Amino acid sequence: MFKETPPSSKAINHDQLSEAEEKAFGLLQNKYEKSAIDMAKFEKVPGYGEARVKRDKERVEKKKREIEELGTGPTKKAQLLEALLTEQIELSEWFGGNTFTIVPAEFVQFVHGVDLALEIVDVNETRHLALGVDVTSSAISIRKKLKIIKEHIANGTLTAMEYFHSEDHNPDFYGTMGNIPQVVIGTDGKTIKELGELWMSAYGLSKLRRNSKQPPLSPESEENQKRSAREAKQNLANHRVQILMLEEIKMQLTVFYKFALAKKEQYIAGDNKQLAESLGVVADKFKSSLNLIDFILSSKKTPSIDDVFKNQEDFVFQSLTEALNDFDNL
Protein backbone atom coordinates (compact mmCIF):
# COMPACT_ATOMS: atom_id res chain seq x y z
CA MET A 1 0.00 0.00 0.00
CA PHE A 2 2.77 2.44 0.96
CA LYS A 3 5.78 2.32 -1.37
CA GLU A 4 8.97 4.34 -1.38
CA THR A 5 7.98 7.50 -3.25
CA PRO A 6 9.12 11.10 -2.97
CA PRO A 7 7.05 13.08 -0.49
CA SER A 8 4.16 14.85 -2.18
CA SER A 9 3.10 18.40 -1.54
CA LYS A 10 0.07 16.94 0.22
CA ALA A 11 2.33 14.99 2.62
CA ILE A 12 4.36 18.12 3.31
CA ASN A 13 1.23 20.13 4.09
CA HIS A 14 0.02 17.32 6.31
CA ASP A 15 3.15 17.82 8.41
CA GLN A 16 2.08 21.32 9.43
CA LEU A 17 1.71 21.55 13.19
CA SER A 18 -1.40 22.80 14.90
CA GLU A 19 -1.13 25.72 17.30
CA ALA A 20 -1.05 23.35 20.27
CA GLU A 21 1.63 21.18 18.64
CA GLU A 22 3.78 24.24 17.89
CA LYS A 23 3.60 25.31 21.52
CA ALA A 24 4.34 21.78 22.74
CA PHE A 25 7.27 21.56 20.33
CA GLY A 26 8.69 24.83 21.63
CA LEU A 27 8.44 23.70 25.25
CA LEU A 28 9.68 20.12 24.77
CA GLN A 29 12.35 20.27 22.08
CA ASN A 30 14.95 22.25 23.99
CA LYS A 31 14.62 19.91 26.97
CA TYR A 32 14.98 16.88 24.66
CA GLU A 33 18.12 18.25 22.99
CA LYS A 34 19.72 19.16 26.32
CA SER A 35 19.16 15.63 27.62
CA ALA A 36 21.25 14.09 24.81
CA ILE A 37 24.58 12.50 25.73
CA ASP A 38 27.26 15.20 25.52
CA MET A 39 30.08 14.21 23.17
CA ALA A 40 32.40 16.78 24.79
CA LYS A 41 32.48 14.66 27.97
CA PHE A 42 34.37 11.98 26.01
CA GLU A 43 37.34 14.20 25.14
CA LYS A 44 39.37 12.87 28.07
CA VAL A 45 38.13 9.30 27.84
CA PRO A 46 40.78 6.75 26.72
CA GLY A 47 40.16 5.73 23.13
CA TYR A 48 38.39 8.99 22.27
CA GLY A 49 40.35 12.18 22.85
CA GLU A 50 39.77 15.70 21.56
CA ALA A 51 40.80 14.90 17.99
CA ARG A 52 38.30 12.06 17.56
CA VAL A 53 35.46 13.95 19.20
CA LYS A 54 36.19 16.96 16.98
CA ARG A 55 36.29 14.74 13.88
CA ASP A 56 32.99 13.08 14.79
CA LYS A 57 31.32 16.42 15.47
CA GLU A 58 32.47 17.63 12.06
CA ARG A 59 30.99 14.48 10.54
CA VAL A 60 27.69 15.25 12.24
CA GLU A 61 27.68 18.81 10.89
CA LYS A 62 28.43 17.52 7.39
CA LYS A 63 25.57 15.03 7.72
CA LYS A 64 23.24 17.80 8.86
CA ARG A 65 24.14 19.92 5.81
CA GLU A 66 23.55 16.99 3.46
CA ILE A 67 20.16 16.29 5.05
CA GLU A 68 19.18 19.95 4.82
CA GLU A 69 20.18 20.12 1.15
CA LEU A 70 18.23 16.96 0.33
CA GLY A 71 15.26 17.95 2.48
CA THR A 72 15.26 14.53 4.16
CA GLY A 73 15.61 15.63 7.76
CA PRO A 74 13.14 14.68 10.48
CA THR A 75 9.93 16.65 10.37
CA LYS A 76 8.71 18.71 13.28
CA LYS A 77 6.03 16.06 13.76
CA ALA A 78 8.69 13.38 14.21
CA GLN A 79 10.78 15.58 16.49
CA LEU A 80 7.75 16.35 18.65
CA LEU A 81 6.99 12.64 18.87
CA GLU A 82 10.60 11.89 19.90
CA ALA A 83 10.44 14.47 22.68
CA LEU A 84 7.03 13.28 23.87
CA LEU A 85 8.16 9.67 23.92
CA THR A 86 11.34 10.48 25.82
CA GLU A 87 9.31 12.17 28.54
CA GLN A 88 6.20 9.99 28.69
CA ILE A 89 7.90 6.58 28.58
CA GLU A 90 9.21 7.39 32.04
CA LEU A 91 6.77 9.98 33.38
CA SER A 92 3.61 8.07 32.42
CA GLU A 93 5.26 4.61 32.33
CA TRP A 94 4.12 4.01 28.75
CA PHE A 95 6.53 1.08 28.50
CA GLY A 96 6.13 -0.05 32.09
CA GLY A 97 7.62 1.17 35.33
CA ASN A 98 11.03 -0.37 34.67
CA THR A 99 11.83 1.22 31.30
CA PHE A 100 14.16 4.21 31.13
CA THR A 101 15.10 6.44 28.21
CA ILE A 102 18.46 7.67 26.99
CA VAL A 103 18.78 10.34 24.31
CA PRO A 104 21.88 9.39 22.27
CA ALA A 105 24.65 11.76 21.27
CA GLU A 106 24.16 13.53 17.94
CA PHE A 107 26.73 11.24 16.31
CA VAL A 108 24.60 8.20 17.10
CA GLN A 109 21.42 9.95 15.99
CA PHE A 110 22.73 11.11 12.63
CA VAL A 111 25.13 8.27 11.75
CA HIS A 112 23.19 5.28 13.10
CA GLY A 113 19.63 6.60 13.06
CA VAL A 114 19.00 5.96 16.75
CA ASP A 115 16.75 8.67 18.22
CA LEU A 116 16.18 7.00 21.56
CA ALA A 117 17.67 4.13 23.56
CA LEU A 118 15.65 2.07 26.02
CA GLU A 119 17.05 0.56 29.19
CA ILE A 120 14.76 -2.07 30.69
CA VAL A 121 15.09 -3.64 34.13
CA ASP A 122 13.96 -7.27 34.20
CA VAL A 123 12.33 -9.23 37.04
CA ASN A 124 15.78 -10.06 38.43
CA GLU A 125 16.62 -6.34 38.70
CA THR A 126 19.14 -6.69 35.85
CA ARG A 127 19.35 -3.58 33.66
CA HIS A 128 19.49 -4.18 29.90
CA LEU A 129 20.26 -1.69 27.16
CA ALA A 130 17.47 -3.40 25.28
CA LEU A 131 16.75 -1.35 22.18
CA GLY A 132 17.87 1.45 19.93
CA VAL A 133 14.79 3.20 18.57
CA ASP A 134 14.29 5.10 15.31
CA VAL A 135 11.21 7.30 15.72
CA THR A 136 9.16 8.28 12.67
CA SER A 137 5.90 9.94 11.70
CA SER A 138 6.28 8.94 8.05
CA ALA A 139 4.63 5.86 6.57
CA ILE A 140 6.68 6.09 3.37
CA SER A 141 10.05 5.79 5.11
CA ILE A 142 9.37 2.43 6.79
CA ARG A 143 10.59 0.08 4.06
CA LYS A 144 13.91 1.90 3.67
CA LYS A 145 14.53 1.87 7.42
CA LEU A 146 13.71 -1.84 7.75
CA LYS A 147 15.89 -2.71 4.76
CA ILE A 148 18.91 -1.17 6.51
CA ILE A 149 18.18 -3.18 9.67
CA LYS A 150 17.77 -6.34 7.59
CA GLU A 151 21.16 -5.83 5.93
CA HIS A 152 22.82 -5.48 9.32
CA ILE A 153 21.19 -8.68 10.58
CA ALA A 154 22.28 -10.59 7.47
CA ASN A 155 25.85 -9.48 8.16
CA GLY A 156 25.63 -10.65 11.76
CA THR A 157 25.73 -7.14 13.19
CA LEU A 158 23.46 -4.88 15.22
CA THR A 159 23.63 -1.17 15.91
CA ALA A 160 26.09 0.53 18.25
CA MET A 161 26.27 3.63 20.40
CA GLU A 162 29.86 4.87 20.22
CA TYR A 163 29.13 7.63 22.72
CA PHE A 164 27.33 5.88 25.54
CA HIS A 165 26.79 7.00 29.10
CA SER A 166 24.03 6.29 31.58
CA GLU A 167 23.81 7.66 35.10
CA ASP A 168 21.52 4.75 35.99
CA HIS A 169 23.35 1.95 34.16
CA ASN A 170 26.92 2.70 35.26
CA PRO A 171 27.74 6.32 36.13
CA ASP A 172 31.47 5.76 35.69
CA PHE A 173 31.26 4.23 32.20
CA TYR A 174 31.92 6.34 29.12
CA GLY A 175 32.44 4.30 25.97
CA THR A 176 30.87 2.20 23.25
CA MET A 177 27.91 -0.11 23.66
CA GLY A 178 27.49 -2.52 20.77
CA ASN A 179 25.13 -5.28 19.65
CA ILE A 180 22.00 -3.25 20.34
CA PRO A 181 18.82 -4.41 18.56
CA GLN A 182 17.25 -1.57 16.61
CA VAL A 183 13.57 -1.05 15.83
CA VAL A 184 11.43 1.57 14.15
CA ILE A 185 8.40 2.96 15.96
CA GLY A 186 6.00 5.71 15.13
CA THR A 187 2.49 6.95 14.62
CA ASP A 188 0.77 9.19 12.11
CA GLY A 189 0.17 12.91 12.22
CA LYS A 190 -3.38 12.63 13.52
CA THR A 191 -2.24 10.78 16.64
CA ILE A 192 0.69 13.13 17.22
CA LYS A 193 -1.80 16.01 17.12
CA GLU A 194 -3.86 14.25 19.82
CA LEU A 195 -0.77 13.77 21.96
CA GLY A 196 0.43 17.34 21.50
CA GLU A 197 -2.93 18.78 22.52
CA LEU A 198 -3.17 16.49 25.54
CA TRP A 199 0.36 17.39 26.61
CA MET A 200 -0.41 21.10 26.38
CA SER A 201 -3.48 20.67 28.59
CA ALA A 202 -1.62 18.44 31.04
CA TYR A 203 1.68 20.31 31.32
CA GLY A 204 2.11 23.03 28.72
CA LEU A 205 -0.45 25.64 29.71
CA SER A 206 0.86 25.92 33.26
CA LYS A 207 4.44 26.16 31.93
CA LEU A 208 3.47 28.95 29.56
CA ARG A 209 1.78 30.87 32.35
CA ARG A 210 4.87 30.60 34.55
CA ASN A 211 7.21 31.57 31.73
CA SER A 212 5.13 34.60 30.70
CA LYS A 213 4.64 35.79 34.29
CA GLN A 214 0.96 36.43 33.71
CA PRO A 215 -1.24 37.75 36.55
CA PRO A 216 -2.53 34.99 38.84
CA LEU A 217 -5.81 33.34 37.92
CA SER A 218 -8.90 33.67 40.03
CA PRO A 219 -9.33 30.79 42.51
CA GLU A 220 -12.17 29.37 40.40
CA SER A 221 -10.19 29.57 37.13
CA GLU A 222 -7.11 28.08 38.77
CA GLU A 223 -9.14 25.15 40.09
CA ASN A 224 -10.69 24.58 36.66
CA GLN A 225 -7.25 24.58 35.04
CA LYS A 226 -5.92 22.14 37.62
CA ARG A 227 -8.90 19.84 37.07
CA SER A 228 -8.43 19.96 33.29
CA ALA A 229 -4.71 19.27 33.71
CA ARG A 230 -5.39 16.24 35.93
CA GLU A 231 -7.82 14.81 33.38
CA ALA A 232 -5.38 15.41 30.53
CA LYS A 233 -2.53 13.75 32.45
CA GLN A 234 -4.70 10.72 33.04
CA ASN A 235 -5.75 10.56 29.39
CA LEU A 236 -2.13 10.94 28.28
CA ALA A 237 -0.95 8.23 30.68
CA ASN A 238 -3.60 5.84 29.35
CA HIS A 239 -3.29 6.78 25.68
CA ARG A 240 -3.55 3.93 23.18
CA VAL A 241 -0.25 4.94 21.54
CA GLN A 242 1.72 3.01 24.16
CA ILE A 243 0.11 -0.27 23.08
CA LEU A 244 0.52 0.70 19.42
CA MET A 245 4.26 1.14 19.79
CA LEU A 246 4.82 -1.88 22.00
CA GLU A 247 3.01 -3.96 19.38
CA GLU A 248 5.17 -2.38 16.66
CA ILE A 249 8.29 -3.38 18.58
CA LYS A 250 7.01 -6.90 19.20
CA MET A 251 6.16 -7.44 15.53
CA GLN A 252 9.63 -6.38 14.45
CA LEU A 253 11.55 -8.38 17.04
CA THR A 254 9.55 -11.48 16.12
CA VAL A 255 10.35 -11.09 12.40
CA PHE A 256 13.99 -10.15 13.06
CA TYR A 257 14.48 -13.15 15.36
CA LYS A 258 13.09 -15.60 12.80
CA PHE A 259 15.18 -14.00 10.03
CA ALA A 260 18.35 -14.23 12.13
CA LEU A 261 17.71 -17.91 12.86
CA ALA A 262 17.10 -18.64 9.17
CA LYS A 263 20.33 -16.86 8.18
CA LYS A 264 22.20 -18.76 10.88
CA GLU A 265 21.03 -22.10 9.42
CA GLN A 266 21.99 -20.87 5.97
CA TYR A 267 25.52 -20.05 7.11
CA ILE A 268 25.82 -23.39 8.91
CA ALA A 269 24.84 -25.17 5.70
CA GLY A 270 27.43 -23.11 3.85
CA ASP A 271 30.08 -24.00 6.45
CA ASN A 272 30.55 -20.36 7.43
CA LYS A 273 31.04 -20.91 11.15
CA GLN A 274 32.05 -17.34 11.97
CA LEU A 275 28.92 -15.76 10.52
CA ALA A 276 26.76 -18.56 11.96
CA GLU A 277 28.11 -17.76 15.43
CA SER A 278 27.48 -14.04 14.90
CA LEU A 279 23.89 -14.73 13.85
CA GLY A 280 23.44 -16.89 16.94
CA VAL A 281 24.42 -13.92 19.12
CA VAL A 282 22.14 -11.61 17.13
CA ALA A 283 19.20 -14.03 17.43
CA ASP A 284 19.74 -14.31 21.19
CA LYS A 285 19.67 -10.51 21.49
CA PHE A 286 16.37 -10.31 19.65
CA LYS A 287 14.89 -13.10 21.75
CA SER A 288 15.99 -11.44 24.99
CA SER A 289 14.50 -8.10 23.95
CA LEU A 290 11.31 -9.82 22.78
CA ASN A 291 10.92 -11.45 26.20
CA LEU A 292 11.24 -8.05 27.87
CA ILE A 293 8.62 -6.49 25.57
CA ASP A 294 6.25 -9.45 26.08
CA PHE A 295 6.56 -8.97 29.83
CA ILE A 296 5.73 -5.25 29.52
CA LEU A 297 2.73 -5.97 27.29
CA SER A 298 1.43 -8.57 29.75
CA SER A 299 1.34 -5.88 32.45
CA LYS A 300 -0.82 -3.56 30.35
CA LYS A 301 -4.59 -3.42 30.46
CA THR A 302 -6.41 -4.92 27.50
CA PRO A 303 -7.17 -2.03 25.13
CA SER A 304 -10.75 -1.18 24.23
CA ILE A 305 -12.15 -2.29 20.87
CA ASP A 306 -12.19 1.36 19.81
CA ASP A 307 -8.49 1.80 20.66
CA VAL A 308 -7.60 -1.42 18.82
CA PHE A 309 -9.45 -0.17 15.75
CA LYS A 310 -7.75 3.25 15.87
CA ASN A 311 -4.32 1.64 16.23
CA GLN A 312 -4.95 -0.66 13.29
CA GLU A 313 -6.00 2.34 11.18
CA ASP A 314 -2.77 4.22 11.95
CA PHE A 315 -0.88 4.82 8.67
CA VAL A 316 2.56 4.17 10.17
CA PHE A 317 1.36 0.96 11.81
CA GLN A 318 -0.19 -0.20 8.55
CA SER A 319 2.98 0.53 6.59
CA LEU A 320 5.11 -1.27 9.16
CA THR A 321 2.82 -4.31 9.13
CA GLU A 322 2.93 -4.48 5.33
CA ALA A 323 6.72 -4.13 5.20
CA LEU A 324 7.24 -6.84 7.82
CA ASN A 325 4.94 -9.18 5.90
CA ASP A 326 7.18 -8.57 2.89
CA PHE A 327 10.44 -8.62 4.87
CA ASP A 328 12.12 -11.29 2.72
CA ASN A 329 11.73 -9.07 -0.34
CA LEU A 330 13.01 -5.82 1.14
Image: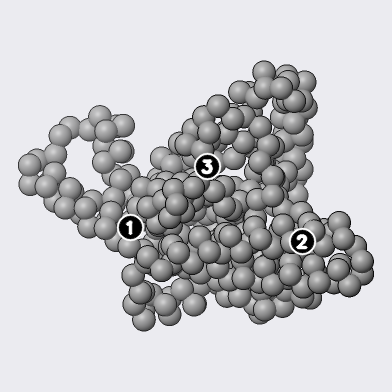
Of residue 121 and residue 226, the one placed in the foreground of this image is 121
Q: Amino acid at mark 1?
A: Ala
Read off the residue under disc 1.
237
- In contact (CB < 8 Å): disc 2 and disc 3: no
Q: How are the colours assigned in the image? A: one colour
Of residue 252 and residue 137, the one placed in the foreground of this image is 252
Q: Residues within 10 Å of mark 1 (few under 14, many from 20)?
A: some
Indicate left or right for 162 with 223 as reference.
Answer: right
- Which-is-in-front pick, marks 2 and 1? 2
* Quadrant into which the C terminus falls: bottom right
N-term mark: 3 or 1: 3
Residue 106 can be seen, yes or no: yes
Quarter residue 184 falls in: bottom right
Q: Residues within 10 Å of mark 2 (few under 14, many from 20)?
A: many
The residue sitting at 49% across, 33% down in the picture is: 167
- Mark 1 residue element: helix
Q: Which mark is residue 113?
A: none
The residue sitting at 67% across, 68% down in the picture is: 257
Q: Amino acid at mark 3?
A: Ile
The residue sitting at 17% across, 32% down in the picture is: 215
Q: Position of residue 198 (x, y in %)?
A: 33, 56
Q: Position of residue 14 (x, y in %)?
A: 54, 63
Q: Position of residue 150 (x, y in %)?
A: 75, 64
* Quadrant into which the N terminus falls: bottom right
Q: Position of residue 160 (x, y in %)?
A: 69, 45
Q: Amino acid at mark 2?
A: Leu
Indicate left or right for 182 with 166 as reference.
Answer: right
The alpha-carbon separation of the residues under discs 3 and 1 comes to 20 Å
